[in-house]
Image: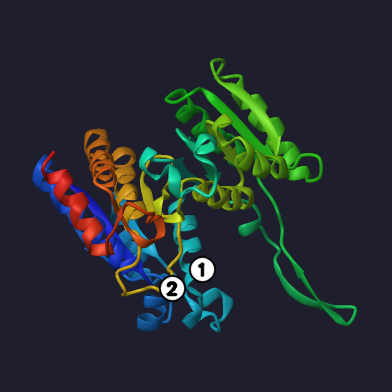
Amino acid sequence: MSRILVLPGDGIGPEIVDEALRVLDAAQARFGLDIELDHGLVGGAACDAEGDPLPEGTLEKARAADAILFGSIGGPKWDTLERDKRPERGLLRLRSSLGLFANLRPAILFPQLAGASSLKPEVVSGLDILIVRELTGGIYFGQPRGIKEENGERVGFNTYVYSESEMKRIARVAFDLAMQRGKRVCSVDKANVLEVTELWKEVVTEEAKAYPEIELSHMYVDNAAMQLVRAPKNFDVIVTGNLFGDILSDEAAMLTGSIGMLPSASLDENRKGLYEPCHGSAPDIAGQGLANPLATIMSLAMLMRYSLQRGDVADAIEAAVEKVLDQGLRTADIHTEGTRKVSTGEMGAAVAEALANG
């Protein structure tokens, strides 16, 4: 039996997770999966109920689970809370507590959505990039950090720090995954300015010696941002640190037509993982049936592939998504002329039906 913890979170989180669970039900029926679900509070919902964005009970459930299906967190409602009590801190603590250091963000353009991308179809058609982002180190976690008074004015400061071991393990993840793809890795840094990324470049280069089949290249982050727009298909696997990965993965998401199409996985060294869409909680459209559940549904496919070792189920879920897109169904964020606009629930139901019918 496999145990999945479901953490819907805030905003559109509950409704998109509901559709992923609808697809999971169809997968269980078709493949005879033995899965036990548990549920918990996180983010703003947990702040409201327990005064903590990551209650100890939720963390205990997360530690006991084989994988976590996560929705989204945050919203203006909680912006006035103390920084350590805000919803986003709960997610950072969850990643850190579970050692989820490797964030995988595929940016794949379904051919049916080439017209929805902000770039010309010939630039993005056939796009298939995997961004491997280090998730538990770097400037988001470095100490010291804070805001203080100095010489009569406020000064904000953060610390950008990585150990050699942190760099080595994320490089190995990128190289291992590239071996299953196009065997090309681009390491993104700012080694001309930042010493920490100068070391990053050295460590990644050393680690690549164990992977002679991999073609390794290095690129400064500003150039990488430009090349993602100019010639994105030149990339296969991109490996980078927490800050740069955060920015580049959202940029890559828009190449696919909508951030609502981008799933993600955050894994520990044993492939236990947290799976979530890359978009935010979008409280302005919550409860209106406008949210795109496909990123969450494809995050479920990644959960099957990486944590439960069921690549067959992952392939079937992804094929069901493609079938629904072939049928012309689109949520508002990817709707174009000649396609049929559907609600969150209608999209989830269509994918579940396509999966059930094989």
SS at circle 2: loop
Q: Is residue 294 above or below residue 203?
A: below
Residue type at mark 2? Pro
Residue type at mark 1? Arg
SS at circle 1: helix
Q: Is residue 195 left or right of residue 12?
A: right
Color encoding of the figure: rainbow
176 or 57: which is nearer to us? Answer: 176
289 or 217: which is nearer to us? Answer: 289
For the point 55% across and 84% down, the residue is 80
Q: Give the image quarter of residue 110.
A: top left
For the point 37% across and 81% down, the residue is 50
Q: Is residue 235 above or below residue 328?
A: above
- Do the numbered discs 2 and 1 sit on residues whose CB atoms are within 8 Å? yes
Numbered badge on residue 56? none
Residue 255 can be seen in this image = yes
Quadrant containing the C terminus is top left
